[in-house]
Amino acid sequence: MWEPATGQSRPIRERMEFNETTRAAIYCRISDDRNDDELGVKRQEFNCRRLAADHGLVNIEVYVDNDISASRFTNKARPAFERLVAAIDTGQVDVVLVSEPPRLYRRPKELERFIDVCSESRDVPTLTVERDRMDLSSPHGRAMARMSATMAALESDQKSARIRRKHEELAREGVWMSGPRCYGYEAVFALNGNGKREISEVRVVATEADVIREAVTRLMAGDLINAIVSDFNRRGIPAAKGGIWRPVSLRQIVCAARNAGLREHTPGKRGSRFPSRENITEGSWEPIISHAQWTAMQVLFSDPARRSTRPGAWLLTAGIGVCGLCGHHLRRGTRAGKPLLVCHKYGSIGGCGKIAVTMSHVDGYVSGVVVSALLRAEVGGPDVTVPDESVILSLKSARQRLEQAQEDCYVLGVLPRDRFLAEIKPKIEAQILDLRARLDAPEAHLTALDGLPSTRPALESWWAAQSLERRKAVIRSLVVRVEIHKPTTPRGSNQFDPNRVRIVWRRPAHSAPVVRQ
Ligand SMILES: [Zn+2]
């Protein structure tokens, strides 16, 4: 390797004598386990150990990240890399060995982090099998490393672009999508001329197609997805991936464009639920439902208010969750894509900022406690009413139809303007008015605690089948607030600690029973 004449960088051996006490770290990473198995890592480790022997290094620790890509598109953590960085940072490593630089980083951002930690006051050199060493302690060495990182990033970007183009091409041709088996269909494989396994035919699985058709027909008739799910489970119909049906999985299946013989592809996005029209092509397989039925599913489920990730799609976000330290209402936040309940400290009415808890943990725990409390008939409270869900759904779908017609008329131009204004708009608006009047009428409201089953299995399945609104209303009927306190388990433990949760009931225990036993 070329050395600058300024003398800023001297050979590593001069600056640092390696001996048997030198603490060496070997880092190995393999990006795609499917092709290389563990062999890639074994080969890297073998080469690094030989390099270590050449330098007289015997005190070695090995860090391995397997099946983790360093591409810009993966956000997977690299646990071993993180441990290595922490070890360097705390002065536990004297020299790092890798088989080639891209094992350590592929994005310039990651290299900068590595440079920072290696050059900060203690100068930890990195040796590579490929070209002996990467000198991050000199400006020149850092520039070389940065250049190689830039080239690696370019290569990775080009590769992603190539893959994306290939997928777009396949989508435009209406070719069946590769990947895991899709409910309702079965791909038949055969070997092609080059001896490669290829899809030769896509068949409809009759029993599954019947399930899809039934769900779609019932949804279009106004049945709630939860009711259909309970019914399927009661009838023992196996779910797509075995086990029981859940609203989310059924919704994904009925919304899939493939059921209508359509191939969907949204560039840059995976699994978009509502692809725009230009990202849909006619597929080469037999449809299970009609285009119109699929469109109806889109309309039914495309309302943002129905999305399970919307704020408030969790039981405790409606002002019931409270910080146990400062009493501030907990808000929705996220960590690593997981919804959290957090005490926000920002803003004029902010809280202490010291409480955060995984939303699903608390929701699950509170649900369980509420169901048990109902069974023990220990709690009760003023009934909170919930509006009739079918009316809400009809209202949502009417609003959706109006928007759709507006788009057809003004954006896409497929609907004549006079027809929209004179016929369609007044008709849908009249429906909306009528539905709103029905929502305001008291008979459209049910009391949250009406008609609860009285045995545990019945109550549990009833609970699971209820809409979020109904479950929230039950909780609001019974619970004043749910306080979240500091965990009592050691920091970093992934276990949910139920002692963090204190439920304040509306009525003291042992008062008028709600559920008659
Ligand atoms: Zn707080």
Image (tube, helix red, strand yellow):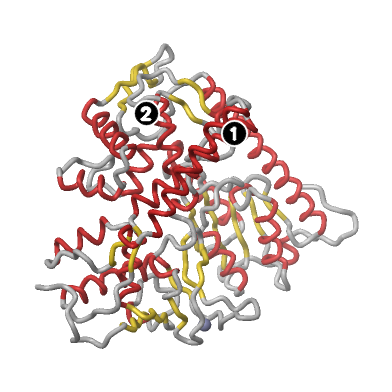
Q: Residues within 10 Å of mark 2 (few under 14, many from 20)?
A: many
Identify residue for label 1.
421
Q: Is 375 positioned to the left or the right of 66 in the image?
A: left
Q: Residue at point 70% right, 47% down?
A: 149
Q: Is 13 positioned to the left or the right of 2 in the image?
A: left
Query: Can residue 62 be seen by looking at this rendering?
Result: no
Identify residue for label 2.
259
Q: Secondary structure at mark 1?
A: helix
Q: In the image shown, does 295 or 444 lie closer to the viewer?
A: 444
Q: Residue at point 77% right, 49% down?
A: 144
The spot of residue 286 in percent (x, y) is 35, 19
The spot of residue 486 in percent (x, y) is 43, 83
Q: In the image shown, does 112 or 93 lie closer to the viewer?
A: 112
Quadrant of the image occupied by residue 441: bottom left
Q: Amino acid at mark 1?
A: Leu
Q: Residue at point 21% right, 29% down?
A: 207
* Whether residue 419 is situated above or below residue 486 in the rendered picture: above
Q: Residue at point 40% right, 81% down?
A: 483
The spot of residue 93 in percent (x, y) is 59, 68
The spot of residue 238 in percent (x, y) is 20, 41
Q: Amino acid at mark 2?
A: Asn
Q: In the image shown, does 325 or 457 lie closer to the viewer?
A: 457
* Whether residue 196 is situated above or below residue 440 in the rendered picture: above
**Which badge, 1 or 2, comes first in the chain's sequence?**
2
Q: Name the image quarter holding the C terminus.
A: bottom left
Q: Secondary structure at mark 2?
A: helix
